[in-house]
Image (cartoon, rainbow, N blue to C red):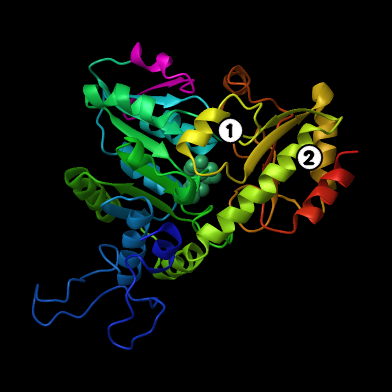
Amino acid sequence: MKFGTKAIHAGIEPDPTTGAIMTPIYQTSTYVQESPGKHKGYEYARTQNPTRTVLQNNLAALENGKHGICYSSGLGATDAILKLFKPGDEIIASNDLYGGTYRIMVRVFQEFGLKFTFVDLSNPVNLESLITPATKMVWIETPTNPLLRLVDIEAIAAITKPHNIQLVVDNTFASPYLQNPLDLGADIVMHSVTKYLGGHSDTVMGAIILNDDETAQRLAFIQNACGAVPGPQDCFLVLRGIKTLHIRMQRHCENAIKVAQYLQQHPKVSKVYYPGLESHPGHELAKKQMRSFGGMLSFELKGDSMPEAVHVMESFNVFSLAESLGGVESLCTHPASMTHASIPKEERLKNGLKDTLIRLSVGIEDIEDLIQDLEQAIN
Ligand SMILES: Cc1ncc(COP(=O)(O)O)c(C=O)c1O
């Protein structure tokens, strides 16, 4: 099956009792048993829910993986992955990460004895020398949030595999439509389903997709034992969102390249971060490991003036100033004070994330209206 057909059909069968083509919302907390332990495979809704099962199978198919496991948020999924490790284990993560991922690592799991090192993994050479016998996981995002750096998944996997280190890829920015990390050697794919997969800014959810049976069993155990499960209505909304993922992604990509090209020639813009631009240092790698370049981009204004950046963000009419990304509507974010505020300022600046950086999640509106909005806001 090709991607669009999988998005609509994979793992989805008509409802066995009525033939309903849409997976029903099984809004129940428990299931009746014939006698103790004799049931139809469902006992209690934290452990299993049919709407969730269908979504999990659909997500696994989209990432060409064997197992899909959903959590109540992207960070819920990250939390479950980090619970695979124990005190003393070392984790190497790229230094350009979603702020909440950095926060759960440093402010929660570091307290429990996990050790984290953050490094620029857009150059895979930086990785090998940091590996010790205690290194158990490498965590990457690609493209990264918010600087859109590209990380070579195959090159990193070639380093982690011989050491038996788990390679986790947060595939939120690309979505499975643009990139399938498991095919490139990653062990675990993580998503904030809240973003492109849901696609309509109406649900918060996370997911993990992987092939290894033993790790999947452990993650499903954590899903049930720790309890961060999504509700059936959210699972329904995501299943519905996914049916148009491929079409939405095509339009996100078409619009984003036009926005990037517009910004690149703008006299007031000093820098545009978008992997679809030939000037982007990761452009060739993006062409190799992604199917197109995505809907996310960031930019800086000449002069690095904070009041000017704020003025632009306040002046938009079509782009809304808001956290999050990946919905049908265009959003603008100020990473330094919003999505990445939990990263200490020195750390942010060291990694190239300036206070004046503006991030755009380019939606699927008409491109003429988006360009006109940028035109009137950056003046
Ligand atoms: C790249 C990335 N990963 C993970 C997350 C966390 O996901 P959630 O907000 O669904 O918990 C986000 C949220 O913005 C994100 O942008």
Q: Which mark is residue 69?
A: none
The relative height of residue 89 versus residue 85 in the rendered view (above or below) is above
- What stretch of residues is rendered in magenta? 111-130
Measured as percent of width and height from the top left, residue 5 is found at 42, 65
Q: Which mark is residue 148?
A: 1
Q: Amino acid at mark 1?
A: Leu
Q: Residues within 10 Å of mark 1 (few under 14, many from 20)?
A: many
Residue depth check, mark 1 versus mark 2: number of the one nearer the observer: 2
Q: What's the residue at 38%, 40% (across, down)? A: 181
Q: Quadrant of the N terminus?
A: bottom left
Measured as percent of width and height from the top left, residue 214 is found at 17, 44
> In the shown orientation, is residue 206 left or right of residue 307?
left
> In the shown orientation, is residue 332 left or right of residue 347?
right
Can residue 361 be seen from the camera position used here? Answer: no
Residue picked out by circle 2: 262
Residue 115 lies within the magenta run:
yes
Measured as percent of width and height from the top left, residue 81 is found at 32, 40
Give the residue furthest to the bottom.
18
Front residue of 172/232: it is: 172
Q: Quadrant of the C terminus?
A: top right
Q: Earlier in the sequence, mark 1 or mark 2?
A: 1
Front residue of 58/40: it is: 58
Quadrant in the picture for residue 91: top left
Measured as percent of width and height from the top left, residue 118 is found at 45, 21
Q: Amino acid at mark 2?
A: Tyr
Q: Are marks 1 and 2 in contact (CB under 8 Å)?
A: no
The relative height of residue 69 versus residue 374 in the rendered view (above or below) is below
Q: Residues within 10 Å of mark 2 (few under 14, many from 20)?
A: some
Quadrant in the picture for residue 11: bottom left
Ligand 1 neighbours mark 1 (CB distance < 8 Å): no
Residue 254 lies within the magenta run:
no
Q: Is disc 2 placed on a helix, strand or loop?
A: helix
